[in-house]
Amino acid sequence: MPFANSRHDPVAYDAPFWLPGGHAQTIFPVLLPNPAVTYRREQVETPDGDFWLLDWLVDPTPRADDAPLVVLFHGLESSSRSHYALALMARLAALGWRGVVPHFRGCGGEPNRLPRAYHSGDHEEIGAMLEAVRARVDPRTPVFAYGMSLGGSALLNWVGRNGADAGRMISAAAAASAPLDLMASGRSIDQGMNRLLYAQNFLRTLKPKAADMARRFPGYIDEQRVARVSTMWEFDETVTAPLHGFAGADDYWTRASCKPWLRDVVLPTLVLNAKNDPFVPAASLPGSADVSAQVLLDQPDKGGHGGFARSPLPGNIQWMAQRVTRFFATGE
């Protein structure tokens, strides 16, 4: 179904008056109570001799074998226990749908076997994970893929690069708060308040994982350089690029950006970005001329990064899960 690329949404997002600004709209949702969600963990062997950890939603109400399934690709240093993941799983359970969160390597709570991590352009990993999920469900099952932030960037890379072939695996895709232009987002997250609030928070877990990998796999990355990393650019220059075949951080940010691939999308795809996202600059967001007719752009003025909290007090984060599942159900 071709889209006009943007349209009036009768349930458009509007931030609560008591939650002003992109930083507050990003951070406050993380602090809200989460719904109770139970997962069943499955370890899946990868084609290269490593493993993935898949967390499947456990629903006390048995579902039909062909009930829709949403595959959630999480964000940087995130997991199935993140606030947006739990909100989505609660929404899926209420709809009678199923859900699964495949963890990128190193994000499931266990170190992986190989000197490999994950990154924003990891489209081959997305494809392989979807193959594994597809093999575990009834062929009649409608499968939808949804990526948050880094997971959204990797998913959009896969959707755009695979064109019509993506439809063999999934029925539709959605990405929320994805850094579509990695150069713009990378520079933004390393500046001013963003560096303090977000870059340092990510580095708090990224650096110990990288140091452990340097000790387990000598010769791939330099542990002493890892210890000196203080920005996301330095981390990608020191760790992400050498581990994944990029010449450096700038090469990674250029080649792994998904924005150039949005013109090649054949699958119905929702791309949701708030214009006040602290580290996905509004100026970097695509317009209708930058995407194919199958891409629906939803760009509210507010919402922050992966936030989109709503009234009444004390607030809730149901809107984003409702927006994405509505798109999967109706195409709008």
Image (cartoon, rainbow, N blue to C red):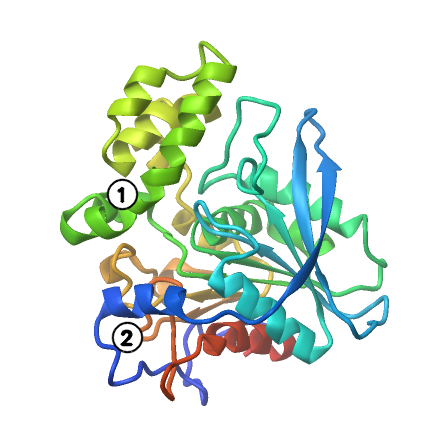
Q: Quadrant of the N terminus?
A: bottom right
Q: Nearer the viewer, residue 22 or 312?
A: 312
Viewer-proximal residue among 181 and 79: 79
- Which mark, residue 45? none
Q: Which residue is mark 2?
A: 301
Task: Return the x and y of residue 180 as percentages of the image width and height.
Answer: 37, 52
Q: How packed is label 1: few (under 14 Cα within 10 Å), some, or many (20 or more)?
A: some
Which residue reaches farthest left? 192
Q: Where is residue 65 drawn, in percent x and y?
A: 86, 66
- Residue identifier under label 1: 200
Q: Is residue 292 above or below residue 189?
A: below
The residue at 54%/78% (across/down) is: 322
Quadrant of the rendered image containing residue 202: top left
Is residue 304 visible in the rendered structure shown here?
no
What residue is rendered at 41% in x and 84% in y? 12
Q: Give the percent coordinates (x, y) of residue 286.
A: 34, 60
- Verify CB contact (< 8 Å) between mark 2 and mark 1: no
The reply, left or right, for residue 18 in relation to residue 72 is: left
SS for callout 2? loop
Question: Which amino acid type corresponds to the residue marked 1 in the rendered image?
Answer: Gln
Q: Amino acid at mark 2?
A: Asp
Element assignment for label 1: helix
